[in-house]
Structures are given as structure tokens and as C-alpha cells.
Image (cartoon, rainbow, N blue to C red):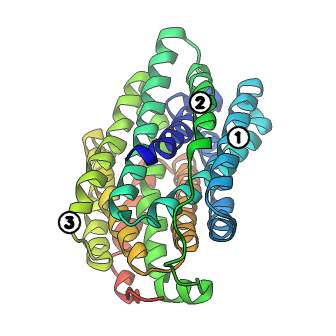
């Protein structure tokens, strides 16, 4: 656990800064579509960087990419504070996403290469979601108290300095026990597993992107409501590694439950914890399976992260577009329908424990 603390601090700060814009999205842009663009720009940067970062981490090691990611996180935070609107904001959110992609892909590969990969990966995902929660709560509270929507971004930009400093203590995990990755073969065998990741893990981002404009609630209340998603995910990822979940049946059941929860979230935010808990169970089931394949974990977690951030990029933009052009009810129904549909093709996944 002590060996993991610099990693956990880094992921906490990176995720907190990324989520600091969510409760104050209406202060950055007008309308659901524009707000979704600000939200999704970060995930676009992450999406394009996580797979190259995973592949690179198998070749040059995890630590250089972890440190580079923290440096980009610090730089992007400063630039967003200096240029908090328009095209520059979108560009620097994208740079922030690239930094997060470098860091998270390497950090998750580091954790999944550990002999106690299930437990350590659970800690990493828990720290990720705790960071997301604190990004929401701290920003909402600071905005309400100081009447300044940039205060949360300033706080977590400052906290990225000690995170970067403590990264000097991170040491490489062992890589020699993992088989060389055949990227084409992995995609072919596990395509539907990664497709389910796009939709089901990305679903939390879609709901979080459109709910602020839909609800019209103030930033502090929004922060509390959306934080329940991540709190539930934290609880799930800490408990779920103690249980054996096979990926295909877990995804099939979870996708149907997720559809109901997403549909219910149009009526009540009390459905948010269900969405978060289901996401946590899905993440644990997939990461445990990827570790058991004993294929280079930089590539495997890179593909997982690419899929997740593809969902975080596309689904919020799609939901925001539908909400802006047609209405919020069709947007929520579309997301619920996409969740339910994943119960069908997951049975075609060649989820075998070999590369």
C-alpha cells in the first residue's frame, strides 16, 4: 500500500482537476451542446493518448509516462486559468486529457502488472473516483462560497505540484512474466468486451454531461448529486475484487440494470448511485480478466482505457446534441437503449484466458 501512495496521490489530483469543470459547466459555455463540448474535449485528449501510452509503457517503462502526465496536468491547469473560455479552453482541456491519458494508462498498467493486481487496481480505480468526487464537491463549494467558478481548478492545479514532486519515489513494476501482445488478435478476440466498455463505462460521463443543464440546479447541489455516482463506484471497486465476476455474464446483467437506472435518472438523481455501483462492478470484472490473460498489461489496459475514454468522448457529445436539438427525454432514452443493447452482443466475446 505504501509503495502505491505516490501513484494514488497522482491519480487523485489528475481526476479531481479533470472533474472540476463539471459543476460549473454553465459558467464556461451556454447550452447543452457547448457545455458537452467543453466536457468532452478532455476525454478526446485522453482517448487519443491512452493506447499509445500503454504500448509505450510496455517498452520504456511506466514511470516516465506517469511523470510526463503529471507535468502536462500542471501545465494545462495553469493555462485553463489563464484562458478560461472559447477555443483556447477547448484546446487546453484537450491537453489536460492527453496528460491524464499518459498518466492513467501507465498507472493502471503498473497496477495490473503487480502480483496483487486485483487489490492494487481496485485502489487505483478508487483513488480515481475519489478524485472525481472531490473535484465536484470542492469546486461546487468554492464556487458557492467565493462566487468564482475557477477556484476549484486553481486548487487542484496547486495540488498537482506535490503530486509531481512525489512521483520521484515511484519505482517500476515487474514486466517479465507477461506475454508479448498481438494487438490485432486481442482486438479480434475481445472486441465485444471493449465495445461494452465504450458504452457502459462511458455512460457515467454522458449522464454527468447533460444533467447540469437538464436539472438547472446550483453548482453545490449538482456536485453532491453527481458525486453519488463516484462514491458508489468507489465502494463497488473496493468490495468487488473479493468476488469472482466473469466478464460476459456480468456485463449482460449489468447492461440491463444500467438501462433501467439511466432511464430512472431522468426522473430522480437517486438512480445515480446505482449507475456508479454497476460501473464499478463492470470495471473490476474487466480488469481482473485482463490481468489473468497474462498479456502485456500496457497494451491490455491501454485498450481498456481507449474504449472507456471513447465512451466518455462520444456519448456526452451525442447526448448533448440530442438534448439540444430534440430534448432531454429523448437523450436519456437513447442512453438507456444503448445500455440495454449491450446485453446481446457480449455473448460473442471470445473471453478466454490466453493471448
Work out how far the residue at label 1 is from the one at label 3, CA to CA, in angstroms.
37 Å
Q: Residue at x 45, y 38 (%)?
A: 131
State the residue at coordinates (37%, 74%). 341
Q: Earlier in the sequence, mark 1 or mark 3?
A: 1
Question: Mark 2, residues whose alpha carbon is within 10 Å: few (<14), some, or many (≥20)?
Answer: few
x, y percent for residue 128: 45, 46
Label 3 Cα crowd, 10 Å radius (few <14 / some 14-19 / many 20+)? few
Residue 77: name its quadrant.
top right
Q: Is residue 41 visible?
A: no
Q: Which residue of the protein is positioned furthest toward the top in this rendering? A: 146
Residue at disc 2, secondary structure: helix
Q: Is residue 71 left or right of residue 348?
A: right
Mark 1 is surrounded, within 10 Å at the Cα level, by few (under 14), some (14 to 19) or many (20 or more) other residues, namely many
Towards the viewer: 338 or 171: 171
Residue 257: which quarter of the image? bottom left
Residue that numbered label 3 is attached to: 243
Residue 71, label in figure: 1
In depth, the one of 203 and 129 nearer the eye is: 129
Residue 220 lies in what quarter of the image?
top left
Which type of secondary structure does the marked residue at label 3 adopt?
A: loop
* Relative horizontal placement of residue 147, taking residue 224 as reference (left or right): right
Q: Residue at the location (36% across, 70% down)?
A: 288
**Tag 2 and tag 3, C-beta contact below 8 Å:** no
Q: Earlier in the sequence, mark 2 or mark 3?
A: 2
Name the residue beneath numbered marker 2: 162
For residue 129, above or below residue 148: below
Amino acid at each position: 500500500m505504501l509503495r502505491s501512495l505516490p501513484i494514488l496521490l497522482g491519480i487523485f489530483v489528475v481526476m479531481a482537476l479533470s472533474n472540476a469543470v463539471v459543476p460549473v459547466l454553465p459558467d464556461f459555455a451556454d447550452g447543452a451542446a457547448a457545455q458537452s463540448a467543453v466536457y468532452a474535449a478532455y476525454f478526446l485528449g485522453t482517448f487519443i493518448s491512452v493506447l499509445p501510452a500503454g504500448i509505450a509503457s510496455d517498452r520504456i517503462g511506466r514511470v516516465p509516462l506517469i511523470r510526463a502526465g503529471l507535468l502536462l496536468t500542471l501545465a494545462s491547469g495553469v493555462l485553463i486559468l489563464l484562458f478560461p473560455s472559447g477555443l483556447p479552453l477547448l484546446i487546453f482541456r484537450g491537453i489536460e486529457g492527453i496528460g491524464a491519458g499518459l498518466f492513467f494508462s501507465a498507472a493502471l498498467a503498473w497496477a495490473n502488472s503487480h502480483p496483487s493486481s486485483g487489490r492494487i487496481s481496485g485502489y487505483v480505480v478508487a483513488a480515481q473516483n475519489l478524485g472525481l468526487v472531490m473535484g465536484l464537491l470542492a469546486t461546487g463549494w468554492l464556487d458557492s462560497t467565493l462566487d468564482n467558478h475557477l477556484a476549484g481548478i486553481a486548487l487542484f492545479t496547486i495540488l498537482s505540484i506535490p503530486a509531481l514532486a512525489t512521483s520521484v519515489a515511484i519505482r517500476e513494476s515487474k514486466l517479465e512474466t507477461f506475454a508479448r501482445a498481438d494487438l490485432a488478435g486481442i482486438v479480434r478476440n475481445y472486441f465485444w468486451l471493449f465495445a461494452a466498455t465504450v458504452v457502459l463505462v462511458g455512460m457515467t460521463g454522458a449522464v454527468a454531461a447533460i444533467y447540469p443543464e437538464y436539472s438547472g440546479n446550483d453548482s453545490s447541489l449538482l456536485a453532491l448529486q453527481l458525486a453519488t455516482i463516484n462514491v458508489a463506484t468507489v465502494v463497488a471497486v473496493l468490495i468487488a475484487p473479493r468476488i469472482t465476476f466473469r466478464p460476459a455474464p456480468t456485463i449482460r446483467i449489468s447492461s440491463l440494470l444500467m438501462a433501467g437506472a439511466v432511464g430512472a435518472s431522468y426522473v430522480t438523481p437517486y438512480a445515480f448511485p446505482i449507475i456508479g455501483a454497476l460501473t464499478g462492478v463492470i470495471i473490476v470484472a474487466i480488469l481482473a480478466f485482463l490481468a489473468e490473460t497474462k498479456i502485456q498489461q500496457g497494451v491490455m489496459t491501454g485498450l481498456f482505457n481507449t474504449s472507456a475514454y471513447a465512451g466518455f468522448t462520444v456519448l456526452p457529445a451525442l447526448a448533448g446534441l440530442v438534448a439540444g436539438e430534440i430534448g432531454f427525454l429523448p437523450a436519456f432514452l437513447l442512453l438507456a437503449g444503448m445500455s440495454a443493447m449491450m446485453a446481446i452482443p457480449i455473448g460473442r466475446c471470445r473471453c478466454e484466458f490466453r493471448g
